[in-house]
């Protein structure tokens, strides 16, 4: 297999794009494509302040690397979740994130949930009896809340996450199986700013997971190989496996599934418009973030519960 650009031996063969590239041209191609998607979906302009949510994994560190190379003004945010079940997941991912920031002279904000709120994510989940074996629902609420809080308090225009195509296709698949119309409306490369919350963007949403792994590897980014121990056996991993089986028989099926959805949504074929999505009607009296229901937001309710119960 030869590189389409220079004819040298290809390092990456992307059957879904019918494209093979050598190391050098793949490392050019991926950031160039990212720049194209940023413009196409109007994610952000050259002067906007970007906060990248970095977990220490290949996607978010690669995203930070790419935005930095493209000349964007992008700082990082690492959330310390306090997960050390089986492996020192949080400590090691934090170490790798700090190392990356240091090597590239990038600004990194760190918020440690335990230092900030008294308990790690697994303890918060256990104390509030949310989630039988998995603290993921509490974790999701906390991550969303803290990312929004830091972006707002520090004046960032946009919050960027490293979700790749496999992540997005798995979520889309799950939402489609249950016809979750309001979730479908909120899925896409850009979620506009609303009620004082920063815009959310996913610049990597069109890259396959294995393209991102190849990028991190060929770029020499040292990242956290292990997934969070709580992700084992999750529904989203199951959906990813199903979609990979489909992809193996029909290269490009995963990308087509996602892109056709975006097209259908943009042309109104879902019969519901983004404006129809349920809007947050209230603001949390404790933190000020928008909520759909009157009273404190989910995160503040979790914190209140652990602080008031003996
Ligand atoms: S939600 Fe669950 Fe993830 Fe939080 S506890 Fe780990 S697996 S990190 S994306
Ligand atoms: Zn080449
Ligand atoms: Zn709140």
Image (tube, rainbow, N blue to C red):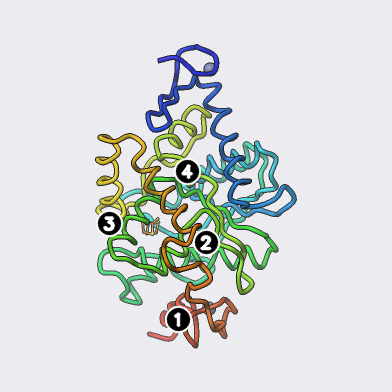
Within 10 Å of the Cα at label 1, are there few (<14), some (14-19), or many (20+) other Cα atoms?
A: some
Residue nearest the viewer, comparing 219 with 67:
67
Report helix, strand or loop for mark 1.
helix
Report helix, strand or loop for mark 2.
strand
Chain-order first, disc 4 or disc 3: 4
Q: Is mark 1 within 8 Å of ligand 3?
A: yes
Q: Estimate the x, y position of residue 172 in percent, counting from the top left.
A: 37, 56
- The answer to whether residue 263 is left or right of residue 102 is left
Residue at numbered disc 2 = 112
Q: Is mark 4 within 8 Å of ligand 1?
A: no
Residue contact at pointers 1 and 3, CB within 8 angstroms: no
Can you tell which quarter of the image residue 82 is in?
Answer: bottom left
- Front: mark 2 or 1: 1
Chain-order first, disc 2 or disc 1: 2
Within 10 Å of the Cα at label 2, are there few (<14), some (14-19), or many (20+) other Cα atoms?
A: some
Residue at numbered disc 4 = 206
Residue at numbered disc 3 = 235
Chain-order first, disc 1 or disc 3: 3
- Front: mark 1 or 3: 3
Q: Is residue 198 visible?
A: yes
Q: Estimate the x, y position of residue 104 in percent, counting from the top left.
A: 64, 37
- Front: mark 2 or 3: 3
Residue contact at pointers 2 and 1, CB within 8 angstroms: no
- The answer to whether residue 154 is left or right of residue 236 is right
Q: CA distance from mark 2 to mark 1?
A: 19 Å
Q: CA distance from mark 4 to mark 3?
A: 21 Å
The N terminus lies in quadrant: top left
- Front: mark 4 or 3: 4
The residue under the point 53% across, 40% down is: 62
Residue at numbered disc 1 = 301
**Residue 300 versus residue 159 in the image, above or below:** below
């Amino acid at each position: 297999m030869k590189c389409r650009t220079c004819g040298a031996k290809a390092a990456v063969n992307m059957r879904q794009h019918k494209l093979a590239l050598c190391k050098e041209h793949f490392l050019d191609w991926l950031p160039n494509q990212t720049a194209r998607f940023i413009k196409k979906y109007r994610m952000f302009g050259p002067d906007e302040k970007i906060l990248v949510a970095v977990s220490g994994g290949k996607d978010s560190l690669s995203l930070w690397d790419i935005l930095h190379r493209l000349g964007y003004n992008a700082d990082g945010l690492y959330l310390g979740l306090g997960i050390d079940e089986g492996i020192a997941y949080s400590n090691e991912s934090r170490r790798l994130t700090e190392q990356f920031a240091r090597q590239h002279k990038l600004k990194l904000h760190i918020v440690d949930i335990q230092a900030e709120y008294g308990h790690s994510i697994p303890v918060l989940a256990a104390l509030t009896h949310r989630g039988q074996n998995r603290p993921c629902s509490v974790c999701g609420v906390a991550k969303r809340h803290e990312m929004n809080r830091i972006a707002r308090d520090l004046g960032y225009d946009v919050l960027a996450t490293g979700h790749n195509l496999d992540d997005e296709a798995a979520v889309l698949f799950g939402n489609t199986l249950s016809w979750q119309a309001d979730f479908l409306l909120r899925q896409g490369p850009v979620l506009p700013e609303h009620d004082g919350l920063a815009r959310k963007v996913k610049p990597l949403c069109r890259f396959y997971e294995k393209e991102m792994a190849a990028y991190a590897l060929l770029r020499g980014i040292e990242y956290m190989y292990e997934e969070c121990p709580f992700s084992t056996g999750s529904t989203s991993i199951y959906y990813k496996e199903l979609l990979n089986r489909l992809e193996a028989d029909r290269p490009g099926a995963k990308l087509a599934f996602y892109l056709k959805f975006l097209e259908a949504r943009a042309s109104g074929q879902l019969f519901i418009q983004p404006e129809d999505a349920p809007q947050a009607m209230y603001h949390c009296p404790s933190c000020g973030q928008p909520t759909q229901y009157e009273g404190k937001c989910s995160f503040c309710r979790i914190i209140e519960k652990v602080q008031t119960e003996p």
